[in-house]
């Protein structure tokens, strides 16, 4: 009789506990914090100073917290758009490129009409940016529907193309002739800038737009039949097809919503804190928003909280690089380990470990 090592296996739970599901993000944050604590000790940093700068300082002054709110806007916008597609099992990984195209489309108005004035300019920039992001996402949707191309690869590769389009414009036709040879556009006029929410800060009305669209995302996914149809198409495609739900329509809708939200965020970035189109517009919002979406459990309300956490980590990471001499790679490792910890926690929410019975272990 041969002896084999008895290993446990995962068995899907019939019903996940709501309390445990809500605790999963907290467990993930605690686990990621502990792992990174050991990492900081290993690289010779003071973990107390690092965590004070990263986790506490963003909330200790209005100046720091206002920067958290500034980061919150684009993260929240992009994550809400991506989450709708993720719930339909349409994985748009190209939000970074859609963000860039949104910034480019929005910048076209003040670049082509630098002397224009009026309250119509910044709303038109936001609309143009949203359309630009949606059009860039439409390329992925077309290839996915017509040629069954993998939307993960297509959307990701298009982000690289978008970066090159940005480089071409800023090193060529849109380059500021008075910009001392820097790859940037002209500074935008006053009417092309988003109104500020709080005097003395950089927080603008895009934050209110992000919260408004979060509410619309909640209604769409939780209270509307089209949202229900979209989610069913992702969870049970055969049942959706039997019920007459169109897979192609779900793909188009998911990608266009994600592109619209990312493009809107890009437009808000150039019309908000930057005030011009720069090559540094691509700061990783599109990739960070993926972590935000999953950390929030792909739920509109959960995404609001996870976006706040990620925005605070972003500002806190900048603080830690200055006050605690933390390398930027360590900040990114913290963000990545947070996503991994969350995915592990959610695996145990949905599954349980089951050990082989004694009779099974005794079989030859």
Image (cartoon, grey):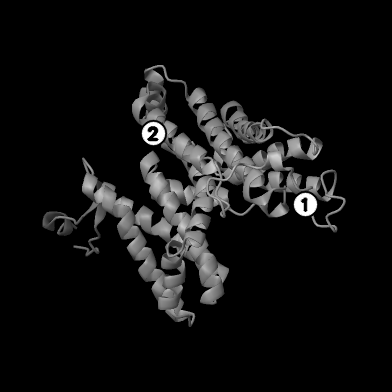
Label 2 sits on residue: 218
In which image quadrant can residue 268 be found? top right
**Which residue is at 49% across, 40% downward?**
208
Q: Secondary structure at mark 1?
A: loop
For image coordinates 66% across by 46% down, the residue present is 270
Q: Residue at x 41, y 34 (%)?
A: 215
x then y, percent, for residue 166: 74, 46
Q: How many marks?
A: 2
Left or right of 8 in this view: 152: right
Q: Cα distance, mark 1 to mark 2? A: 37 Å
Query: From the viewer's perspective, is residue 184 above or below residue 254?
Result: below
If you read the primary sequence from the N terminus, does the residue marked by circle 1 or circle 2 appear first?
1
Which mark is on residue 184? Answer: 1
Specify the quadrant of the image occupied by residue 84. Answer: top left
Tell whether 50 sits left or right of 271: left
Quadrant position of the N terminus in the picture: bottom left
Q: Could you classify mark 2 by the number of other residues whose Cα lies within 10 Å: few (under 14), some (14-19), or many (20 or more)?
A: some
Which quarter shows the C terminus?
bottom left
């Amino acid at each position: 009789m041969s002896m084999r090592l008895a290993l446990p296996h995962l068995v899907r739970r019939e019903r996940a506990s709501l309390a445990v599901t809500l605790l999963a993000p907290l467990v993930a944050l605690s686990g990621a914090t502990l792992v990174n604590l050991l990492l900081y000790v290993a690289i010779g940093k003071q973990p107390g100073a690092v965590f004070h700068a990263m986790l506490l300082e963003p909330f200790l002054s209005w100046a720091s917290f206002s920067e958290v709110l500034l980061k919150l806007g684009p993260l929240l916008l992009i994550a809400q758009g991506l989450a709708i597609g993720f719930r339909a099992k349409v994985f748009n990984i190209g939000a970074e490129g859609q963000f860039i195209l949104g910034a480019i489309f929005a910048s076209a108005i003040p670049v082509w009409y630098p002397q224009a004035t009026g309250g119509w300019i910044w709303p038109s920039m936001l609309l143009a940016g949203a359309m630009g992001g949606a059009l860039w996402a439409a390329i992925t949707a077309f290839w996915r529907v017509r040629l069954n191309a993998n939307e993960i690869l297509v959307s990701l590769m298009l982000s690289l193309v978008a970066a090159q389009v940005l480089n071409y414009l800023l090193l060529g036709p849109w380059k500021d002739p008075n910009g001392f040879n820097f790859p940037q556009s002209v500074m935008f006029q006053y009417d092309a800038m988003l109104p500020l929410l709080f005097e003395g800060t950089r927080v603008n009305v895009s934050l209110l737009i992000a919260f408004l669209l979060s509410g619309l995302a909640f209604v769409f996914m939780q209270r509307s039949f089209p949202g229900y149809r979209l989610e069913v198409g992702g969870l049970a495609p055969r049942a959706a097809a039997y019920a007459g739900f169109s897979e192609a329509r779900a793909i188009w809708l998911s990608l266009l919503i994600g592109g619209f939200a990312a493009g809107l965020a890009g437009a808000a970035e150039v019309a908000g804190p930057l005030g011009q189109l720069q090559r540094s517009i691509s700061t990783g919002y599109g990739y960070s928003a993926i972590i935000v979406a999953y950390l929030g459990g792909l739920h509109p309300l959960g995404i609001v909280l996870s976006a706040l956490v990620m925005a605070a980590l972003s500002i806190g990471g900048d603080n830690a690089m200055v006050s605690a001499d933390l390398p930027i790679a360590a900040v990114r490792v913290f963000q990545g380990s947070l996503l991994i910890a969350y995915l592990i926690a959610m695996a145990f929410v949905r599954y349980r470990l089951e050990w082989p019975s004694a009779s099974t272990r005794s079989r030859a």
